Image (cartoon, rainbow, N blue to C red):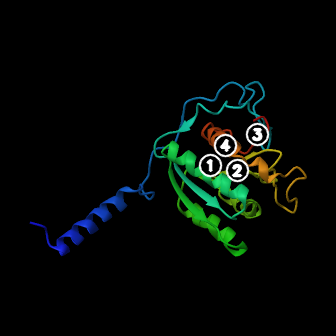
C-alpha cells in the first residue's frame, strides 16, 4: 500500500533538513588549530637564508606538493570580477578545496562599493584563511588587512605593495598586479593564468601559510 502523499512530503522535507545540516560544519564552534600535513620539499626556501618580511621567494616547482591542510581547514574564497584570469583562479581554488576536503565558503564582492563590505563579510565568518582572487580587491585589502593581524590572508595572482605579516601572495610575471595606482605590470598576460599555474598557485600559497611562511611573495615563474 502506498503511503499518503502528505506523508511522503513530510518525509522528504525531513530528509532535506538532515542533508542541509550535514552539508557543512558550524563555524561558530571552536575547532583545532590547523596544521600542515606533510612537509615542504627541497627548494621551497633556502633554510640558510629564510625569507625576510615582504621578501620574495622562488620555490622549485612541486616543492609544495607534499603539503596539505589538516582536516576541518576553514577557508573563505573572497572574489571580485568576472574576467577570465579571475574565473580560472576561482576554479582552481574550488578544485583544490574539493580534492583536499577543505571546508570552503565563498564571498562574492559586487561593484566597487561592495569590495570593503565583502572583505568584512569574509572576516566575520572567522575562517582559518581568506583566499583573495581578483585584482579589484587588492587596494581594499591594503586598507583592511593591517587592522586584522590575527587573520591570515592569501592573495592569488596579485600582491599588495606593502603587505603586513598576515598577508601572503602568489604571483608571477604574467600577473603581478600591485594596486595603489601601480596597476598591472608591463608583462601582464591573461594567458599566463593557465590551469596548471592556477592550481600550483593555490597549493604553494597554502603550503607557505601552513608552514608560517607568511607576509611574503611566492614567485611562480618556474613552471
Secondary structure, mark 4, is helix
- Asked if residue 144 lies left or right of residue 98, the reply is right
Camera-side mark, 4 or 3: 3
Q: Dot 2, crowdedness within 10 Å: few (<14), some or many (≥20)?
A: many
Q: Residue furthest front?
A: 1
The answer for how far apart the CA atoms under marks 4 and 2 are is: 8 Å
Mark sitting on residue 156: 2
Q: Are marks 2 and 1 in contact (CB under 8 Å)?
A: yes
Residue 33 drawn at (x, y percent): 50, 43
Secondary structure, mark 3, is loop
Q: Dot 3, crowdedness within 10 Å: few (<14), some or many (≥20)?
A: many
The answer for how far apart the CA atoms under marks 1 and 3 are is: 15 Å
Dot 1 or dot 3, earlier in sequence:
1
Dot 2 or dot 1, earlier in sequence:
1
Q: Dot 1, crowdedness within 10 Å: few (<14), some or many (≥20)?
A: many
Residue 136 drawn at (x, y percent): 74, 64
Read off the residue under disc 1.
92
Q: Are marks 1 and 3 in contact (CB under 8 Å)?
A: no
Quadrant, the N terminus: bottom left
Q: Is residue 156 visible?
A: yes
Read off the residue under disc 3.
220
Dot 4 or dot 1, earlier in sequence:
1
Read off the residue under disc 4.
205
The answer for how far apart the CA atoms under marks 2 and 1 are is: 10 Å
Secondary structure, mark 1, is helix
Taking the spot 56% from the left edge, 48% from the top edge, the residue there is 95
Residue 62 appears in which quarter of the rendering? top right
Pick whichever, 15 or 1, lies toward us: 1
The answer for how far apart the CA atoms under marks 2 and 3 are is: 11 Å
Amino acid at each position: 500500500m502506498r503511503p499518503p502523499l502528505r506523508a511522503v512530503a513530510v518525509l522528504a522535507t525531513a530528509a532535506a533538513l538532515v542533508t542541509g545540516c550535514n552539508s557543512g560544519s558550524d563555524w561558530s564552534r571552536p575547532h583545532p588549530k590547523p596544521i600542515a600535513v606533510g612537509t615542504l620539499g627541497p627548494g621551497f626556501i633556502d633554510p640558510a637564508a629564510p625569507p625576510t618580511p615582504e621578501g620574495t621567494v622562488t620555490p622549485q616547482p612541486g616543492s609544495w606538493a607534499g603539503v596539505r591542510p589538516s582536516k576541518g581547514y576553514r577557508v573563505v574564497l573572497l572574489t571580485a570580477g568576472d574576467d577570465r584570469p579571475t574565473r580560472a583562479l576561482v576554479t582552481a581554488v574550488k578544485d583544490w578545496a574539493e580534492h583536499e576536503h577543505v571546508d570552503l565558503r565563498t564571498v562574492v564582492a559586487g561593484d566597487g562599493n561592495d569590495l570593503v563590505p565583502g572583505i568584512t563579510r569574509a572576516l566575520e565568518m572567522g575562517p582559518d584563511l581568506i583566499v583573495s582572487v581578483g585584482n579589484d580587491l587588492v587596494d581594499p585589502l591594503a586598507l583592511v588587512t593591517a587592522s586584522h593581524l590575527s587573520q591570515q590572508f592569501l592573495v592569488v595572482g596579485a600582491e599588495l605593495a606593502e603587505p603586513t605579516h598576515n598577508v601572503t601572495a602568489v604571483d608571477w610575471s604574467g600577473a603581478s598586479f600591485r594596486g595603489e595606482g601601480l596597476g598591472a605590470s608591463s608583462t601582464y598576460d591573461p594567458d599566463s593564468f593557465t590551469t596548471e599555474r592556477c592550481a600550483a598557485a593555490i597549493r604553494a600559497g597554502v603550503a607557505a601559510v601552513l608552514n608560517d611562511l607568511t607576509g611574503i611573495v611566492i614567485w611562480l615563474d618556474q613552471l
